Amino acid sequence: MTNRYSYQYYQKRFQSFSEAPCLYCPGNCITSCPTFTQTRNTLYSPLGYTRSLDIAVDKCLKCWRCTFSCPVEYPLSILVERAAERCREKCFGYVIIKDGGKYLVGELEYVNRMKVFSEKVGLGIVALDYVSSLENRDSSVSMEEKDMIGYSPEVSFLLGVPHYTEVIYEFTGNLDITIKLHLPCLLLPRETEILSSLEKTGVTVEEIVKDVCIRIENTGEKLKDLYTLCPRALETGAKLLDDLLIQLIGT
Ligand code: SF4
Ligand code: SF4
């Protein structure tokens, strides 16, 4: 699936890069950039990074926020990854942990969390391991993409499949709860779909926070009262929405 929410889409944009260079427009990207909002220094913003890849390699978080807000979708993250020579080919080894009609797909490190969640919503489980080169690849993901649902923002973005919050209403009754939600970087373009799906399942979002990136220091305090969708944010002490859903589903 090559939709606007997927890494593959931006890879294609990168290939036609010369047709869509940075316009050096007034910089729609700047205020979306966590390293700029933290430092207020344009050197540490997409404008600075497009002028100095050396600085970008060191400082850019490759969070994709600037690309999502850019009129020409300038794929700075790919440029920086390539400059740093650590742009992995996006391929995976995978293990089917549990069979199912549809599969919850997430990184191997989250497999125990996925087991608990999939038990509640009746999904199979696929655990992915990022593989850095084709030579080391165990297998490629060959399941029909329509059967796959991403557990983490990274997996949804890299495989171009729906994040579980976009389809959660298919698996639950009315949960009747109001929450404050943190939207992670890679899910920013999916905000409409996520909010609409949560609403259908009775989850009202009274406040949505989109300007916090967990790669910036001291984000834990900002996430304290929010539910987030990014398992990596657990390291900051944040609460995950899937933990709340697990408690509510079937009660
Ligand atoms: S990266 Fe995009 S938004 Fe930022 S200055 Fe260039 S064209 Fe404008
Ligand atoms: S990828 Fe993130 S950190 Fe890097 S320039 Fe873009 S918005 Fe800033």
Image: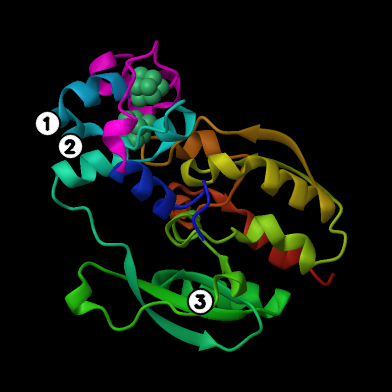
Q: Which mark is residue 54?
A: 1
Identify the residue at horizontal 69%, vertical 47% (top origin): 193
Q: Is residue 103 above or below residue 29?
A: below
Secondary structure, mark 1, is helix
Is 43 inside the magenta-drawn segment? yes
Q: Which residues are magenta?
A: 16-44
Which residue is outermost to the top?
26
Question: Badge 3 is on which residue?
Answer: 112
Secondary structure, mark 2, is helix
Identify the residue at horizontal 49%, vertical 55% (top origin): 2
Write down which quadrant ligand 2 falls in.
top left
Q: Is residue 94 visible?
A: yes
Could you classify mark 2 by the number of other residues whose Cα lies within 10 Å: few (under 14), some (14-19), or many (20 or more)? some
Q: Amino acid at mark 2?
A: Val
Is 171 inside the magenta-drawn segment? no
The quadrant holding residue 15 is top left
Residues at marks 3 and 1, CA–CA distance in whole angstroms:
39 Å
Q: Nearer the viewer, residue 15 or 246?
A: 15
Quadrant location of the C terminus in the rendered image:
bottom right
For marks 3 and 1 on the same chain, the one whose residue lies earlier in the sequence: 1
Q: Amino acid at mark 1?
A: Asp
Which residue is outermost to the bottom?
99
Q: Is residue 183 visible?
A: no
Q: Which mark is residue 19?
A: none
Q: Nearer the viewer, residue 249 or 128?
A: 128
Q: How is the image coloured?
A: rainbow
Mark 1 and mark 2 in contact? Answer it, CB < 8 Å.
yes
